[in-house]
Image (tube, rainbow, N blue to C red):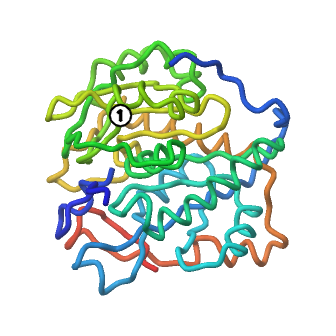
């Protein structure tokens, strides 16, 4: 089990979670533009006892707001559907966000459903049907498991810790950071702009020794954990539009718990904003769509009401399912 989350109370939130070109699959249309993107967010399993009365799965509102702030709408994806239903959802949405939390990265329903979308996305991108995936904290960890075919995580504690990034040489030529102002790129390396709330990660040495990870991802940044493990903190697919951050860009603008050591500086807010816009702009390149407007409207998260959770978790609001 990925122990990327505290088990009880207010601290639930504080857990979760080399050379290449910028080339994408050659068949993908670079001209495709979809100005009404919908990003699917996979619900996470409720493990905290204080949350269980409200539902079996959940999505913190911070991820929803992060996605919407980039110019997209959100469709929550339950963990109890059939493979055929997930295939239908894949044809409707324009990208997938894998959030942080606590779940077994190989046997949980979260991992099994994520694998379905991952395999669909691989096939689609190979056929020129552009489809991006973003993983935050445990979501990034899960991407490494899916690519490597095994769980390579080790203890790499950065608990309630904001950090600057140790950018690699690939960062400046990456798609993720392309277009970032020079001032912000400097700030990324000098200021603690990234909120870290995880206990595990992929060590740089482990990544470098794994051929599948080396072939699939470029490492854009690394960090050093409290236990001195040098871990991978930002990744980008070399051929596929798959992205992962061990840190939490959504908290910079949308989490305010006073016990959280969360970056809220102007540069931190700018970082969060640009990454949200980047991922949603990737989603704009997908031409997936719903069969009709009525079905689309009925499946968006606007139909759901978040629960105020600031008095029993560190999230301000949570969508429960």
Would you name the residue on which mark 1 appears? 268
- 267, above or below 248, in the image: above
What is the crowding at mark 1: few (fewer than 14 residues within 10 Å), some, or many (at least 20)? many
Residue 306 appears at what percent x and percent y?
42, 74
Residue nearest the viewer, comparing 286 with 273: 286
The count of marks equals 1
Looking at the picture, how far across and down is residue 142, in whole percent? 45, 51
Q: Check the picture and name the quadrant holding the N terminus.
A: bottom left
Q: Residue at x 42, y 72 (%)?
A: 58
Q: Image check: 216 left or right of 37?
A: left
Relative to 83, say whether 266 is above or below.
above
Kindly indicate the quadrant of the structure image that contains residue 164: top left
Q: Secondary structure at mark 1?
A: helix
The answer to which image quadrant residue 292 occupies is bottom right
Residue 199: give x, y in percent of width and height. Answer: 23, 47
Spot occupied by residue 66 in the image (x, y as percentages of width and height)? 48, 51
**Residue 234, relative to residue 309: is it above or below?**
above
For image coordinates 31% across by 54% down, the residue present is 16
**Residue at 81% across, 32% down:** 30
Q: Quadrant of residue 262?
A: top left
Residue at the bottom extreme of this rendering: 53
């Amino acid at each position: 089990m990925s122990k990327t989350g505290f088990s009880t109370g207010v601290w639930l939130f504080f857990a979760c979670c080399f050379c290449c070109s910028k080339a994408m699959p050659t068949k993908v249309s670079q001209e495709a533009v979809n100005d009404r993107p919908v990003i699917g967010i996979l619900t996470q399993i409720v493990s905290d006892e204080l949350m269980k009365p409200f539902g079996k799965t959940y999505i913190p509102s911070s991820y929803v707001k992060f996605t919407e702030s980039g110019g997209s709408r959100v469709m929550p994806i339950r963990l109890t559907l059939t493979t055929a239903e997930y295939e239908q959802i894949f044809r409707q949405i324009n990208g997938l966000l894998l959030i942080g939390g606590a779940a077994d990265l190989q046997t949980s329903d979260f991992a099994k459903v994520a694998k379905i979308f991952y395999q669909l996305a691989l096939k689609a991108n190979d056929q020129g049907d552009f489809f991006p995936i973003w993983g935050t904290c445990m979501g990034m960890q899960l991407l490494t498991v899916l690519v490597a075919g095994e769980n390579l995580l080790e203890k790499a504690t950065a608990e309630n810790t904001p950090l600057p990034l140790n950018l690699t040489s690939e960062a400046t030529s990456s798609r993720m950071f392309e277009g970032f102002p020079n001032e912000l790129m400097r700030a990324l390396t000098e200021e603690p702009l990234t909120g870290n709330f995880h206990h595990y990660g992929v060590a740089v040495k482990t990544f470098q020794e794994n051929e599948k990870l080396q072939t699939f991802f470029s490492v854009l940044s690394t960090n050093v954990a409290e236990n001195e493990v040098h871990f991978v903190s930002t990744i980008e697919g070399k051929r596929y539009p798959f992205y992962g951050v061990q840190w939490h860009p959504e908290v910079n603008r949308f989490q305010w718990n006073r016990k959280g050591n969360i970056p809220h500086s102007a540069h931190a807010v700018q970082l969060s904003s640009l990454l949200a816009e980047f991922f949603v702009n990737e989603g704009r390149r997908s031409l997936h769509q719903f069969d009709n407007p009525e079905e689309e409207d009925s499946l968006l998260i606007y139909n759901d009401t978040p629960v105020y959770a600031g008095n029993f978790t560190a999230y301000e609001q949570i969508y429960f399912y």
